């Protein structure tokens, strides 16, 4: 039996007629990739792909997205099933280790994460160095990187056991650090983790309890928070994940790598989408103004954008949105909130979903539209929205970092460029410059 011939792609130079054959690499799903690693050596040329929108930067077994069909898989499992059936920590285990855990494996994993939720007491002093009105994401950038100064026993990136411990610590401690950032901005005392609560319930407790009054989240709120965490846990090679991988390729410690991901996530084009939804609602102002703003959204010459509708990756529908809408409806019904902004959001959703313009272009509400509404209803300040994104995405970041570190061919990332500046020219002394 002979092996199947290697599939190749032939690239021909129109000017010289020279050709080069490049291997075609096939994955489980999605477009095949042309392996261009030998292109420069064979032809003297690089490829140009600004923003890397047509370049595969790595092989990964973690997450697959089909934006045209509205599919999101983690290790082969559909996100809808995970959000409906699994917990966030079960999803974390899946991302880290490749398979859904058995009952005892999940219990052991939950116990390990619970044991790591407290942070070093001296980290409190780090918070005191920030202004009281500092943005929580600015605080998170600093304190997550600072963790490397407190946990020296898990920074050897070449030791599989230390990589494992670092992964557990980051998943467990970043919610605690995030809750501390929220408390610091409010001038309230920090709330320590409680080992008898689930991951999501514990996070809500740390954010909203005060010494004078215990906060007991309802099952609907806990379920909604758990779903928010699951639905944002990983999303393939987006900007922040690529940042984590690039930082990790330099052999930086995992705390520094995750801190770099947080800085990338902070950008409004990435992690600030659900905050932008509420800012848009503020701009619309009242339900009576919705038709006017929808017409503005249809006008390409108008700078107004309908935030929270459509998605850069999902060209059909966001598979996470249906699950998030279900939780949104549950939370609003349970809390019985009379909030004009939330009523405005629900009316905007109703009108847009029945407008032929948005239907034809498949501009449906995405996960950020509903998550922003849920978080506001829960009582989170808007500046915490991106922090919550970072809490969730930590599992994906550290799983992607771990996968990269286990690759035997790991090399430091080094993108190339097309230089378009001046050609070499003689130096002009100051006295002769005009």
Image: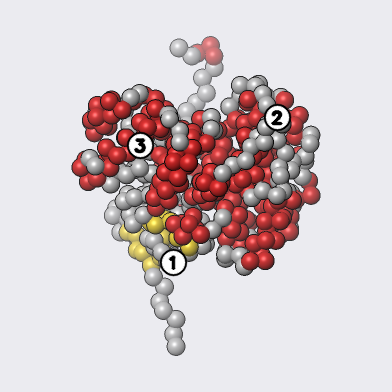
Mark 2 lies on residue: 212
Give the foreground label among 3 and 2: 2
> Looking at the image, which is closer to me, 328 or 218?
218
Which disc number belongs to residue 273? none
Secondary structure at badge 1 equals loop
Local packing at callout 1 (Cα closer than 10 Å; few below 14, some 14-19, many 20+) is few
Secondary structure at badge 2 equals loop
Mark 3 lies on residue: 346
Q: Whole-percent x and y of residue 23? A: 42, 65
Q: Is residue 27 visible?
A: yes
**Mark 1 vs mark 2: which is more N-terminal?**
1
Mark 1 lies on residue: 28
Quadrant where the N terminus sits is bottom left
In the rendered structure, the answer to whether residue 148 lies left or right of residue 270 reads right
- What is the CA distance from the residue labelled 3 to the residue labelled 1? 39 Å
- What is the CA distance from the residue labelled 3 to the residue labelled 2? 35 Å
Place residue 165 in its image quadrant: bottom right
């Amino acid at each position: 039996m002979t092996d199947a011939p290697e599939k190749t792609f032939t690239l021909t130079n129109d000017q010289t007629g020279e050709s080069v054959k490049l291997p075609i690499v096939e994955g489980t799903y999605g477009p095949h990739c042309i392996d261009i690693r030998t292109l420069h050596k064979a032809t003297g040329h690089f490829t140009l792909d600004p923003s890397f929108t047509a370049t595969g930067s790595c092989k990964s077994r973690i997450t697959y997205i089909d934006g045209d069909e509205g599919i999101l898989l983690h290790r082969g499992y559909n996100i809808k099933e995970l959000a409906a059936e699994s917990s966030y920590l079960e999803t974390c285990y899946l991302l880290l280790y490749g398979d859904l855990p058995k009952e005892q494996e999940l219990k052991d994993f939950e116990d390990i994460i619970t044991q790591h939720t407290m942070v070093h007491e001296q980290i409190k002093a780090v918070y005191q160095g920030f202004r009281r009105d500092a943005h929580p994401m600015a605080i998170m950038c600093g304190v997550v990187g600072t963790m490397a100064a407190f946990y020296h026993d898990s920074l050897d990136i070449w030791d599989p056991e230390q990589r494992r411990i670092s992964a557990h610590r980051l998943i467990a401690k970043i919610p605690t650090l995030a809750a501390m950032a929220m408390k610091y901005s409010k001038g309230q005392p920090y709330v320590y983790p409680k080992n008898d609560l689930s991951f999501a319930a514990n996070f809500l407790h740390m954010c909203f309890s005060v010494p004078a009054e215990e906060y007991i989240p309802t099952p609907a709120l806990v379920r909604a928070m758990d779903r928010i965490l699951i639905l944002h846990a990983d999303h393939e090679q987006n900007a922040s994940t690529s940042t984590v991988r690039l930082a990790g390729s330099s052999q930086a410690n995992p705390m520094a790598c995750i801190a770099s991901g947080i800085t990338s996530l902070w950008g409004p084009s990435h992690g600030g989408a659900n905050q932008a939804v509420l800012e848009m609602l503020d701009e619309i102002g009242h339900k009576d103004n919705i038709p006017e703003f929808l017409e503005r959204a249809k006008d390409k010459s108008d700078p107004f954008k309908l935030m929270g509708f459509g998605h850069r990756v999902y060209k059909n529908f966001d598979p996470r949105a249906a699950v998030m809408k279900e939780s949104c409806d549950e939370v609003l019904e349970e809390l019985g909130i009379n909030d004009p902004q939330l009523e405005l959001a629900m009316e905007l959703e109703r009108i847009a979903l029945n407008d032929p313009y948005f239907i034809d272009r498949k501009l449906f509400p995405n996960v950020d539209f509903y998550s922003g509404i849920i978080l506001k209803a829960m009582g989170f300040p808007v500046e915490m929205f991106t922090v919550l994104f970072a809490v969730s995405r930590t599992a994906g970041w550290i799983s992607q970092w771990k996968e990269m570190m286990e690759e035997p061919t790991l090399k430091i990332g080094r993108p190339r460029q097309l230089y378009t500046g001046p050609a070499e020219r003689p130096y002009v002394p100051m006295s002769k410059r005009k």
